[in-house]
Image (cartoon, rainbow, N blue to C red):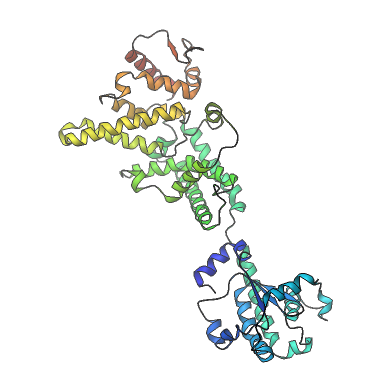
Amino acid sequence: MGDKGFQQAILEHPTWNSCFLHVVSNYDPIPKLFASVSHNVLNSTYKPFGTFLWCSNMSCAFFEEPESVLNLIVEMCPYSVGHRSNEIVWYGDVLEKLQRGTICRGVSDIGEWDISLLHAGILIQIEAIKVERSQGQLENDGFSSVIRKIEKKAKDFIACKTNVFDPSKKLNEMKINMTYLEWYKKVSVSRRGYYDVFKNMQSKSREEIVKRKNILTHYWDKMVKEATKMPQKEGQFLHPIWLYGGTYYRRMVEPLDIAEYYRKGKKDYLAAGRSEHYKLLEQWEKHEKPVGHQSKASERNRDCSLTKDSCFWAHVEEAIVSCKLFQDGEKCTRKERESSQENLVKFENYVMDLITDYAVSPEIFLKQSSFMKCVELSRVVPCLQVGVDSSKWLEAHYKVSGGSVFHILGLKNWSRSPRTQTLDFQNATGSERRFEVILSWISSSLFI
């Protein structure tokens, strides 16, 4: 017996019902405990769950709808009590008989032809567990009303199972919504980039993207909640198809959530603003075992338009906050300045690790992007590579883009050394000069 919450969980996960198999004999005296308070049983918060294999001496029948099981308990107990009320039922013997026997029954056994298949099936089930009573007795002793109740409940039960959330049916629909975001990302490149355009610019296209984003978030949030309820294999939380889709969704949509968060003037997204379903999708993606060996470069090329860490822009926003706090020496304490400097050092190391792993999109280097703003602000902070040898960022940029950005720029005087795998700066001297030249070209030539 389970309460309403448990019943709802079973209903939302149809496969669970078959995980609980209860074997009941129609001569078992235990059901009389429920039959003696039949009215209370039918209206009780606690009801049967799972699949019931109801057995007689000669046959058996399956029932899985809880109300049907209750009706059978109430209606059949008077007969079971009257026949063998003091006899202990040995279920091992019952199952052994069922294993030895072959059950084959059809509509012809009922003697009626003008009835629905569902009604016929219920009649066969009832007759199977009441073999000692003739068909005439079945129709005359009140079982006809029980059959009607069971038929109605069975129809409702089937309808509920049909309407249960099925993620596979909606996956293709979600792909359509995702194409809107892909289009928006593509057209945003000519301005300030996917993240910054969504954060700073209001337009009709943005309103459409917000709508699509909300649809996707609702789907994946529900999908993750469903996955946490389901029994999982060790090391596998989602089927690879949904895990891949969820990872792609997270990397496309979470930056937009971060943009909305900081657009409203909030801070510390990672600690105070991140949705639980993003955390779980990221956790599951990290636990998923990679199939075969694949180099970082080939992995990067496969998905070159997305930054691997979906929280990248949250780190950028917090770094900008730290830069401003560090620069505003009069309004912050020495401890706050030291903390800001420490955070910026961590941020720089974090970004360089991503770049080393081919895990960032070249889009972060777009003109007036939040990341480039952060680079400019951080140049005044001591102990940062940006302040000492700023060309390191752009050499890393070359690594991430595979040279494509420089080809777009038409920088024919810049070439990559095949041996050192670094940049050959033919017309510039000194790290600061190199940094200024590249920044100038990126700002003036790459994008409007």
Q: Quadrant of residue 344?
A: top left
Looking at the image, residue 18 sits to the left or right of residue 338; the answer is right
Indicate the quadrant containing the N terminus: top left, top right, bottom left or bottom right.
bottom right
Q: What percent of the width, then of the height, locates residue 391?
A: 37, 18
Q: Nearer the viewer, residue 230 or 330?
A: 230
User: Residue 163: in sight, yes or no?
Assistant: no
Image-based side of 420 in relation to 267, left or right: right
Task: Report the quarter where the C terminus lies.
Answer: top left
Question: Relative to 311, does residue 94 appear above or below in the rendering?
Answer: below
Q: Quadrant of residue 177?
A: top right
Q: Position of residue 233 (x, y in %)?
A: 57, 51
Q: Nearer the viewer, residue 359 or 160?
A: 359
Q: Relative to residue 28, is residue 355 depicted above or below?
A: above
Q: At x 51% / y 40%, what residue is drawn?
A: 181
Please name whichever residue, 371 or 52, is drawn nearer the observer in this view of the structure.
52
Q: Is residue 352 visible?
A: yes
Q: Taking 1 as reference, is 437 above or below it? A: above
Residue depicted at x 81% and y 72%: 104
Position of 431 relative to 66 (above/below): above
Q: Where does residue 220 sit, x and y in percent of width and height?
A: 51, 50
Residue 144 x/y as whole percent: 70, 85
The image quadrant of residue 75 is bottom right
